[in-house]
Image (spheres, coloured by chain):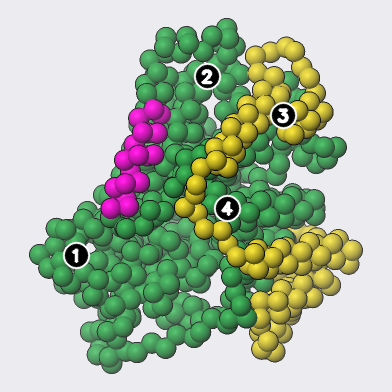
Chain colours: A yellow, B green
Amino acid sequence: MLYFYIIPNHIEPVDTGWVYPSTIPNAVAIILVLSGTAVFCTPTRHCARPASEVARAGLFLAVLCFGIWLISKVGFIWAAPGVAVGLMALMGERRGFWLLMGAGATPAVIWLLVDVLLDRSLP
Amino acid sequence: MVDFSTILAGFGDAFTLWNLSFVFFGVVVGQFVGAVPGIGPVMAMAIAIPFTFGLDTLPAIAFLVGVNKGGLVGGAIPAVLMNTPGTPDAAATALDGYPLAKKGKPLKATKMALFSSVTGDTFSDVVLITVSAPLAVLALRMGPVEVFALMIFAFSILSGLIGQSLVKGVIAAALGLLAASIGADPEHYTPRLIFGYYEVYDGLPLASVAIGMLAISEIIRRLSQMRGHVQPAIIIDETGNKDDRRVTFAEYWGCRFTMLRGAMIGTVLGALPGIGSTAAAFMSYATAKASSKDPESFGKGSLHGIAAAESANSAVVGANLIPLLTLGIPGSVGAALIISAFMIHGVQPGPLLFIDQGRLIYGLFGAMVMANVINLLIGQIGLRVWIKVVSAPESMIFASALLLCIVGVSMATGGLFGVAVMLVFAALGYLMTVFGYSVVIFIIAFFLGPRFEMSLSQSLAITNGDLSKIVDYPIALALLLLAAGSVWWLTWKSPKATEEITGDPTSHK
């Protein structure tokens, strides 16, 4: 797909010079096909992770995606405490003190560091 | 090449209170994150890079070097106290550190680790300062064809990081090259694979890729393995004997040959890109055990065992900068991050650094020496504090790290688009780890990709499209032969040697 569809459609064809814009991506596509075939055909000593673990990783990534969407809508200051508490709760943290630290202290320290000390704007 | 006044001015810069304060802060942060299992100095450096944008180049790089050096000292703390190395480099330290802590001497073990770490680090820094400028003079004689051969050599060193599967290593490198080819191509400047996102016209943001692949994907991997488990606090039993809380000068001096041997092993392996500090630590440990009059004491709390491992793994840090500063080749992830920090600050690493930025480089050398002194002082004072840090809940630390990554990348890329790119690469990094593909190879190939393409284009122009003319360039030919030799050595010989020492087929990575 990379070789036959993506590269021809998303790289402008150029016929001057020694190395065309598509030279390296085409070479990479060929290497990937050959190496992928080799990996598919040869047995491996690598043990795959349990599906539940991969799903859990997907869940954390989804929470992060949601968090970034939330930051884009309401800003870091308002979204960060919720994102921090959500992540900590998902990790299994149930102690009120540490949840409060995550929701309050961490965003406050980041605000102090970025907004006040470095004089840069938060997202 | 570099006149004496530049060297003095560079060292003078390093010793200003402003720059020293960043070295100090870097060492504190490094020891802190090193002491937390799972974070480590590499992840801390990746997170910290965007926060150094507002700084001048010297304090920014000195801060990152401080994080790296402090992280190695901090990494020994959980290795000694919990038998859980904070960094992979400290795995060999746990072999004797943990048994010594179990005997009721945790402070003696951590202090021996600190002293040997600083000794090894200082040794390799002296070697770096001595040899890098003459090597850069040699490197300056290289033209585009030689640079192309150097790029081939740089890719060949990736074979040292490949691990169990050669094919998977090739795939990881190919994916890194593919990611590097996104954006305008270096010869015609036409857009490639940008899919309408003109934000990546100049290439994928370095900070997004590095932080996504190295920091976020690793945090996600660790989080996915947690099952509501809150890290246990550590109960430290002490004998109450004052001598068991310190390392006497006689004990330190008694380990001098072990530390010197470890420092030499670490320096040599660190200067060879792609081998890494874990292999150096185990090799030094094995050599110390083999040459000891009392080999039975190893593994039961021997100070020589701790000294061997820590002096070697710390010596790798300084030596890692030799190929980086002289040739512009990152030999490890830490070096790759330092190279990216250089580039973000508008400095191109390589032999020209000593001419164009001599003062900066000697300032960096001064900062490295001072980082060792500060490492020793902070380590002496802060060991008890860092021991408490080990018992901080992972939930709090990982949530904070994720928020810092989001803010850092947003600052580095000027908006949330870079953060979205970071998440894409975090997912890719996680999947690569899950399926056994090296993220380190991906990152190094990503860094080298644009220079490789540019040097290939220039070499073809010079040789009129006939790369076989490369034999007319003796340095290029020598580099190609060296590349072939290093592929053979790193792919076949070195893994077997490391496996024999560590008993772990993946430990040489």
- Subunit ID for the residue under disc 1: B
Label 2 secondary element: helix
Q: Of the residues under marks 1 and 2, which one precedes in the sequence?
A: 2
* Above or below, B81 relative to B181: below
**Residue that numbered label 4 is attached to:** B435
Residue at left offset 40%, top offset 29%? B483
- Amino acid type at image mark 1: Cys
Q: Would residue B446 be found to the left or right of residue A120 on screen?
A: left
C-alpha span from label 3 to label 1:
59 Å
Q: Of the residues under marks 4 and 1, which one precedes in the sequence?
A: 1
C-alpha span from label 4 to label 3:
23 Å
Residue at left offset 23%, top offset 58%? B286
- Amino acid type at image mark 3: Tyr
Residue B144's disc is 2
Q: Would residue B439 be found to the left or right of residue B75 on screen?
A: right
Q: Are marks 3 and 2 on the same chain?
A: no
Q: Of the residues under marks 2 and 4, which one precedes in the sequence?
A: 2
* Above or below, B104 relative to B334: below
Label 4 secondary element: loop
In this view, the residue in front, B297 or B371, is B297
Q: Is residue B429 in view from this perspective?
A: yes
* Above or below, B195 relative to B144: below
**Residue that numbered label 1 is attached to:** B255
4 vs 1, front mark:
4
**Residue that numbered label 3 is attached to:** A3
C-alpha span from label 3 to label 2:
29 Å
Residue at left offset 35%, top offset 46%? B495
Find the residue positioned furthest to the top.
B464
